[in-house]
Image: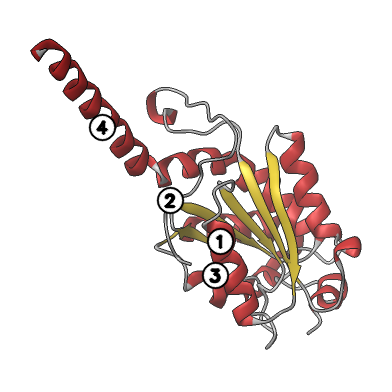
Amino acid sequence: MNDASDDSNRGDGEDGDPDHNHGHGHHGNGHDHDHGHDHHRHDISELDFAVLTVSSSRGIDEDAAGDAIIERLEAAGHAVAVRELVNDDYDSVQDTIDRFANRGDVDCVVTTGGTGVTPDDVTVEAAEQLFDKRLPGFGELFRSLSREEIGTRVVGTRATAGIADGTPVFCLPGSENAVELGTESIVLEEAPHLAGLARRDDAETENGVEAENGTESEGDGNGA
């Protein structure tokens, strides 16, 4: 498995630029989430991210792409709850994304690596099996933005995104330039809105239960 070497040398769509317990009941221990108004009323202004690097040829200390993601997330006021690196192995990638999506302190997941066309690029296949809803516009926009820099080589990238158990998951290529582009131009712009919308029903259900319980309590008090 040679994701990192491919990232630095291949210069194809995988990297964006040659230079450059499936369950619920989570999200309880992160930031105090602030919500906006109007069509952004469900936005979450401060998110807790999980960052996953998929590579069999480098360690966490040599993970420039992961570092670049974290730097940009934190500079924008978000936090990183967990960061890990796994080999280019389907089960390892899928299990880690699934675990991240179901942590109580993770609002969004960002992965880097494994989105190309070599036999060991399995991130897309592993992640999409977990998606309850796919977000095809993410990959379309990423490829459109990348085309300005790498031209037709963009056809080799399979960057993807979706919602897994109420958690947005963004899968970016493995190069530093690619994750900078994807994080700055798309993830930071859309993650607050997507994270809020993905859990809107849960939040409204919880608020409805609280309101109902409050009404029952008031009724009991009046009856006494």
Residue drawn at x 62%, y 57% as measured from the top left: 142
Residue to which mark 4 is pinned:
208
Q: Residues within 10 Å of mark 1 (few under 14, many from 20)?
A: many
Which amino acid does the dot numbered 1 rest on? Gly
User: What is the secondary structure assignment of the residue under circle 2?
Assistant: loop
Give x and y (percent) for residue 203: 37, 37
Query: Where 72 falls versus 33 (above or below)?
Result: below
Give x and y (percent) for residue 181: 72, 51
Residue at the extreme front: 224
Give x and y (percent) for residue 86: 73, 72
Residue drawn at x 42%, y 47% as measured from the top left: 198
Task: Quarter of the image for the N terminus: give it.
Answer: bottom right
Residue to which mark 2 is pinned:
25
Alpha carbon distance from label 4 to label 3: 33 Å
Which amino acid does the dot numbered 4 rest on? Gly
Quarter where residue 138 is shown: bottom right
State yes or no: discs 3 and 2 in contact (Cβ < 8 Å).
no
Mark 4 or 3, nearer chain start? 3
